[in-house]
Structures are given as C-alpha cells and as structure tokens.
Amino acid sequence: MTIRKEGIIKFLRWFLILSFMSSLTGCFYWMRAYQTYLQMGDFDQHFTITAGNEFQLHFKDPVLYSDDFIALSKLQPSQKSITETGQTWHYWFHKVDLEGNIIKPAVKFYFDLYFNKQERLTQWSFSQLFLQIAPAEFLEISIRSIGGAEINQGKRQIKANTDLIEKIDTDLPQKAQVLSQLGLPLSIEHKADQDIYLYHFLLQTPSIEEGYEDRRLSVVKLSFDKASDELIKMSGRFIGLKISINYQKYVKK
C-alpha cells in the first residue's frame, strides 16, 4: 500500500499541532486557528478574494469563532454592528504622535470582520488606506504564501517560504504615492541602501485585557529603496497579529 505525500505532510502537521496543544489546556482557539492554517494549503478551495475599494478575504468553510479573536488578540473591536446575517466587528486605527495623541488632519484605516449567525468568521476586509501600506496584489500573494509555511511553536509565528510562490509581474509602490496617503512619518532611519519610515497607529477600543495594553499600539515600519524610492518592505503588528512583507521577494525580476 502506498501513502500519498500530501497525506503524510498533513498527518505530520496535525501531529505537530496536537503535541503543541497538549501543553495549552483548554486553548481550543489555537486548534481552530491551525485548522484555518491548513485550509490555506488548498487556498482556492477554501477562500476567495475580491479587491476594489476594499480588499476582502472570504472564508468558504469558516472555522474561527468571534470569541477566538478576543482570546487571541486580547482586544475588543472598536464597534460591533448587528446585521441580518450575523454581526460585523470594526477595528479602527488612528495615526498618532509619539505621545499617543491623534494627529490632525486625521489619517486612519480599518479592518472589518464579518461573522455569520453561528458566530464564525466569513469575511475579513481591509480598508483602502491599509492598501497603501500593503497593496492588494502583494497582500493577496502574502496571504496565499501562508499555506505550507513553517510554524515556529516557541514564538507562535508562521514564516512563509516565498520560493514556493509564483512571482507577480507588477511595479513596487512608490514613496511619493505612499506618503501622499499616510503623511509624514514620526522618524526616518537612514541606512546604506534604504530609509525606514516609522508610523504609529492606535487602535480605538473600549476594552483591553489587563497585561496586553501594548497591543493597542501598531508600530509600522516602511522601508524604501534609496535609489528607486520603491517600497520594498513593510512590518507591523495589528490586533496582536504580526505582519511582515518583503515586497521584493514576490516580484518577478
């Protein structure tokens, strides 16, 4: 009897996560998060993407519950809205100065999470301004690259192998366009071949679990190539989720 390679890989992944879960009594939300990660391996079977004024990730076979996001992020959304199909959670991020004061004129972006009547996540939407930080085509390919990514149990991080992803034929974002939307940074770190622009965004939230207050602040770093003024990397943490995209690794050379 022969065993398919895909079946072996899936079994090893489940064995890995079950071993990890054995030390996290009652943390079923991590199991559901891992189930969603496994779905990423067959992306088009479980997800669809639409992009326009917003970037929308649709979950065909929803697994995550609304309570899972509170358990994972330790943060309440800015606002909750009841809809005919369930509810929508809105997360608003406001650009702030080093003291945490909202900068005027206002610069803000949002995430919207849509849950069905069973309280399972069916859609995650990113606002137009966020797409200045992570353009739609790069956001899509970075999400797709999660499938089959390396799991670091200790740091609870996922590191994608960009060598396995088909590269896209597009231009890198230009600094002038990004700054026209985000405004001036709090600081600029000058390096030999790039400049790193620092921004702070503060989540509008009514409640934070004690001990996790620092998660309200999103520290965003944008790296621009000195020679071309192209945006080559973005890193930040949003509602407890660390995101880092090296745009150069996704573009055809």
Image (cartoon, rainbow, N blue to C red):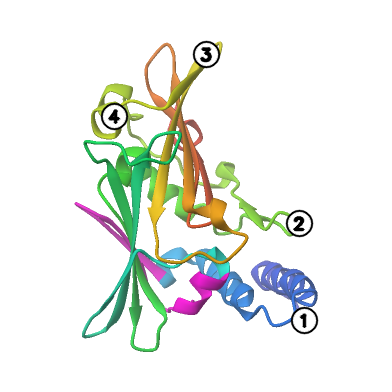
- Residue carrying label 1: 1
Q: CA distance from mark 1 to mark 3?
A: 55 Å
Q: Position of residue 127 (x, y in %)?
A: 28, 52
Q: In terms of sequence position, does the residue under pointer 4 or pointer 1 come before the other?
A: 1
Label 4 to label 3: alpha-carbon separation: 22 Å
State the residue in front, 205 or 7.
205
- What's the CA distance linking mark 2 and mark 3? 33 Å
Q: Are marks 1 and 3 in contact (CB under 8 Å)?
A: no
Element under label 2? loop
Amino acid carrying mark 3 in the image: Asp
C-alpha distance separating marks 4 and 2:
37 Å
Considering only order in the chain, which callout, 3 or 1, is on the residue closer to the N terminus? 1
* Residue at x 33% of width, y 23% of height: 175
Q: Which kind of residue does numbered mark 1 sit on?
A: Met
The amino acid marked with disc number 2 is Gly
Mark number displayed over residue 154: 2
Extent of the magenta region: 47-71
